[in-house]
Image (cartoon, helix red, strand yellow):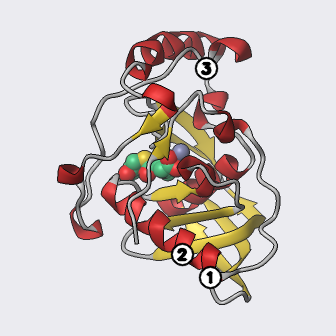
Amino acid sequence: MAVLDIRVLGDPILRTRTAPTPAVTEAVRALVADMFETMYAAEGIGLAAPQVGCSERVFVMDVDENPLAMINPEIIEREGSERAEEGCLSIPEIFGDVDRATRVVARATGLDGKPFEVELTDLAARCMQHELDHLDGKLFIDYMSLLKRKFTARKWEKEAASYPGFIRKLEPGKQRSRRSRSRDKSANSATAPFEPEL
Ligand code: K1U
Ligand code: ZN
């Protein structure tokens, strides 16, 4: 297993919709293992394949010690709405409020290649929707008002300089087990990826 580099805002892969992953191969299982390792190292609760440079329709998440890997996920039921703050491992130091369904039922293929369904609520439901957006090339900043986006773009211009090539390398010293996670407050950055969308 390996801790992978994380792509940050400005890398075009984060804006590319993934095609369905055709089969659950050994390579897909190895990718999932590396993604869990990377997510725990980054102290996140979710991670989608494009964030580690792979255009696969795959994400991992772990909310309240419930690790979940979803291949070709879809939401088949959604209910409720709540606005809450989100961050993204690919846009460090940027936070914003997003409205999300509070309960979802999702269908996906598991690591065994078999379909399964899962009901998720609250933070787990939010995380699932955030990760599914990644697979469609969508980021939480897309839900911001124009004013907030402009403010955020200026902040990101400064942050981005710490991420040459839009790559976030995780510091080995910062890697922790999933039992000792807390929000990642490390700083970094790229160019002006908000600008074309304003
Ligand atoms: O996909 C990602 O960038 C991971 C991201 C997912 C996320 C889901 C739901 C709300 C916010 C962010 C994170 O893991 S951000 C960091 C984090 O560990 C965290 C976020 C909210 C609550 C608790 C932890
Ligand atoms: Zn994210």
Q: Is mark 1 on a helix, strand or loop?
A: helix
Q: Tell which circle, 3 or 1, labels the residue nearer the N-terminal end.
A: 1
State the SS at label 2: helix
The dot on residue 30 is: 2
Tell me the amino acid under the disc marked 3.
Pro
The C terminus lies in quadrant: top right
Q: Nearer the viewer, residue 117 or 49?
A: 49
Residue that sits furthest to the left in the current view: 173
Number of other residues with Cα within 10 Å of mark 1, as a class: few under 14, some 14 to 19, many 20 or more: few
Q: Position of residue 75 (x, y in %)?
A: 75, 64
Instruction: Return the residue at label 1.
Output: 26
Is 45 displayed left or right of 116 in the figure?
A: left
Residue for point 25% across, 46% down: 171
Residue placed at 63% from the left, 37% from the top?
139
Q: Mark 3 points at which residue?
A: 193
In the visual, does 116 lie left or right of 175?
A: right
Location of the N terminus by quadrant is bottom left
Gap between marks 3 and 2 measured at Cα: 31 Å
Amino acid under disc 2: Ala
